[in-house]
Image: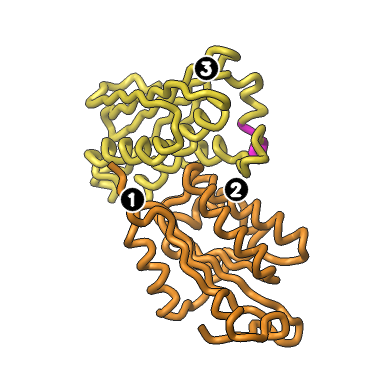
Chain colours: A orange, B yellow
Amino acid sequence: MGLKIYDEVEEKSKLTAFISGEIDHHSAKEIRKEIDINLQKLNPTDLYLDFSKVDFMDSSGIGLVMGRYKLQSERGGKVFIQNPPPLIKKVMLVAGINKLAKIVSIDVPLSQMQKAKESAENSDKPSIHTQADIDVHKNDDDKSNQKTSEEVDGNAEEKNS
Amino acid sequence: MPKKKILNEIKLSFPSLSENERFSRLAVSGFASQLDPQVDEISDIKTAVSEAVTNCIVHAYKKEIGKIELIARIYEDNVIYIKIKDHGCGIPDIKKAMEPLFTTSPEEERAGLGFAVMESFMDKLRVLSKEGKGTSVIMTKKLRTKLDK
């Protein structure tokens, strides 16, 4: 992956978590775990949660955003909600979560979307693909940067019976 | 609830396993599909069912696996009725429980918005509960008719 400096002046770093599938109480635990592992590992200033491939979400998704907001706030970081589809956005607006995490619309490079899409197609269950743009001063050797992008697809082989 | 003619009815009973959150909303969505609903209406119904069933799993049967009963009906004039009943711990203060952001499970990252979502996504919401006996959530929604579409 290429190294991208998000904001050189303020030395910000960015982690994007591409969530796909359905977010409910059952699936939220797994999603939460994956995001938090990466948050801890990469310590980004900004966490972007991409919802473009989420096709169902109840208030468990709101709890997920609130929880990450809390974690990020404690470390002086921010959370952004990226590209939610209209029906997902509706739940977010009913909850007023946009007061904690700004809803943003961002053009995502096709290659990143493809990876998120592939993991979604392999499973009915939710999956996460994370992509990090880490500040060059914190991560200046190539190996560690390569590790920042990884695909996590829980139970892709399993099928609901 | 509506004093209208029941056109169709299903009854489901399943244990309070979190895997059944998805099953229950898909079952109701499949049942409601005969009304030829719009995408947003189906999404509203699925979300409301998911909230109600999750409440049974997270709150009513917090420390045990119990039975959840679901009844869905179609009344004339395109009205869908959904009743979700448990025999769990009950809600001591329904008014308090329905306040947005009130939750007894913050450690599980529950947002405390379940009832608020049900209320805003359905037309009517009624909650009956008795401590130690259980809770029933009854929701109705009138779907847009083909003429409206």
Residue corresponding to mark 1:
A158
User: Split into 4 quadrants, where in the image is the C terminus of chain A?
Assistant: top left
Question: Within 10 angstroms of label 1, few (less than 14), some, or many (20 or more) residues?
Answer: few
Q: Give coordinates of residue A61: x percent, y percent.
A: 54, 50
Q: CA distance from mark 1 to mark 3?
A: 35 Å
Residue corresponding to mark 3:
B134
Q: Of residues B43 and B79, which is closer to you in this image?
A: B43
Chain identity of mark 3: B
Callout 2 touching callout 1 (CB < 8 Å):
no
Q: Give coordinates of residue B66: x percent, y percent.
A: 46, 21
**Drawn side of residue B4 relative to residue A137, left or right:** left
Q: Of residues A8 and A96, which is closer to you in this image?
A: A8
Question: Within 10 angstroms of label 3, few (less than 14), some, or many (20 or more) residues?
Answer: some
Determine the residue positioned at 40% across, 21% down: B1
Start and end of the magenta stretch?
B98-102
Mark 2, secondary structure of its residue? helix
